[in-house]
Each structure stands twice: as C-alpha cells, then as structure tokens.
Image (tube, rainbow, N blue to C red):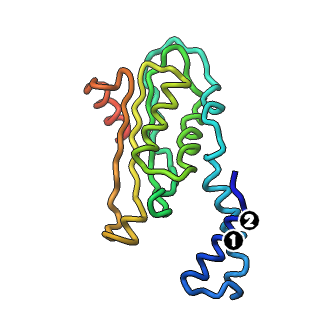
Amino acid sequence: MIDKEKVEAAVRLLLEGIGEDIHREGLVETPARIARMYEEIYGGMDEDVALHLSKTFQVDSHEMVLEKDITFYSTCEHHLMPFYGKAHVAYIPDGRVLGLSKLARTVETFARRLQIQEQLTVQIADALMEHLAPRGVMVMMEAEHMCMTMRGIKKPGSRTVSIATRGVFEGDMQLQNTFFQMIR
C-alpha cells in the first residue's frame, strides 16, 4: 500500500535537494500529484495475480494460444526510470484456457511494480505455469529503457529483449520458431 504522506514528504525533499523552490506555483501541488501517480503506476505491488488467472474455461484443444503486442509500462528498480514496450505471451493449454484479457492483466500486474525486465519476464511465465498449469509457456518482452536512452549511454531506440520458456517450450525449437513466426 502506498503511503501518500511519505511519498509527498520525499518528493518535497527531492525537489529541495535539486535546488527547486517547493513553494513555486508550478511545484506546490507536485508532491500530491506524484503520490497519486505512484498509487496508479505501482498498484501491482498490492495485486494478487492469482485473481486474474483463476478465470478459466474448459477446452479440448492443445494448440498454442498467443496474445501478442501487449503494451506495458514499468519502472526500473535501479534508476526509478520507466521502461516500456511490448509483451508476447503464449501457452499450450492442458484442458483449460484463460479469458483473453487475463494475459494482459497478468503482464500489467507484474509491470506495475519496481522491476527489472528479466525478472518481469520470468514472473509472468512462472505465474502462468503455477496458476493455469498449461503444458508450456513462452514469454518474450521487448522494451526501451529510459535509463539507457536519456541518461548514461544515451542510445534512444535500442530495445532489450528477454525470453522465458517453460514446459514443452523448453528445448523445442520448432515450437519456439512457431511462436516467433506468430509474433512477426
């Protein structure tokens, strides 16, 4: 749970620390705005992904289900700067499928936490394996990291790609290639 009072106090200290006048008209309400924003962008910290993954439907098929181009926004835990991009999530059902929005909700829940992309990718794959129990899962995330584009190395447009495979996707190059063809 976000402690708005602590966030507001911290933002005031930060503004003073960089030499700003916290009583300046444009900054007077900034601490409260930041606290409200943090409730939204870090709301995944208090969310249980199992709630999203509990709504399933019976199927006889064991064919790949893929939700691609799921837009996500997250915050790097190293620099507290945004990273954002697309997630592609596939699974092979074993008698149950999720409601279509649940894959996007799962991505969003984990993305709305302080994160690193590599861990985010793994968390999504592991949550699907744990709560849906499919035959396999494959998650690929492509993101631009502001800590690399507006500071440090300053390489805008560069993207980091991370992949997690579980179950039947592990070591099955044909299945992985089908995934890659489907996301193109």
Residue drawn where x is 45% and y is 35% of the image: 89
Vertical placement of residue 37 versus 162, above or below: below
* Residue position marked by numbered label 1 in the rendering: 9
Q: Which element is circle 1 on? A: helix
Residue drawn where x is 48% and y is 20% of the image: 134
Using the image as rendered, state which of residue 99 and residue 113 is in the foreground: 113
Instruction: Please indicate whether residue 174 sits to the left or right of residue 139 in the image.
Output: left
Using the image as rendered, state which of residue 99 and residue 138 is in the foreground: 138
* Residue position marked by numbered label 2 in the rendering: 5
Where does residue 93 sit, x and y in percent of width and height?
48, 19
* Residue 38 falls in image quadrant: bottom right
Circle 2: is it few (<14), some (14-19), or many (20+) Cα within 10 Å?
A: few
Residue drawn where x is 45% and y is 26% of the image: 91
Residue drawn where x is 47% and y is 55% of the image: 84
Quadrant holding the C terminus: top left
Where does residue 35 sit, x and y in percent of width and height?
69, 64
Instruction: Please indicate whether residue 174 sits to the left or right of residue 92 in the image.
Output: left
Q: Which element is circle 2 on? A: helix
Vertical placement of residue 82 versus 27, above or below: above
Instruction: Please indicate whether residue 167 sits to the left or right of residue 26 in the image.
Output: left
Where does residue 33 sit, x and y in percent of width and height?
70, 69
Which mark is drawn over residue 160?
Answer: none
Amino acid type assigned to the residue bearing label 2 in the image: Glu
Amino acid type assigned to the residue bearing label 1 in the image: Ala
Vertical placement of residue 26 versus 3, above or below: below
Alpha carbon of mark 1 to alpha carbon of mark 2: how far?
6 Å
Circles 1, 2 touching at the beta carbon (< 8 Å) = yes
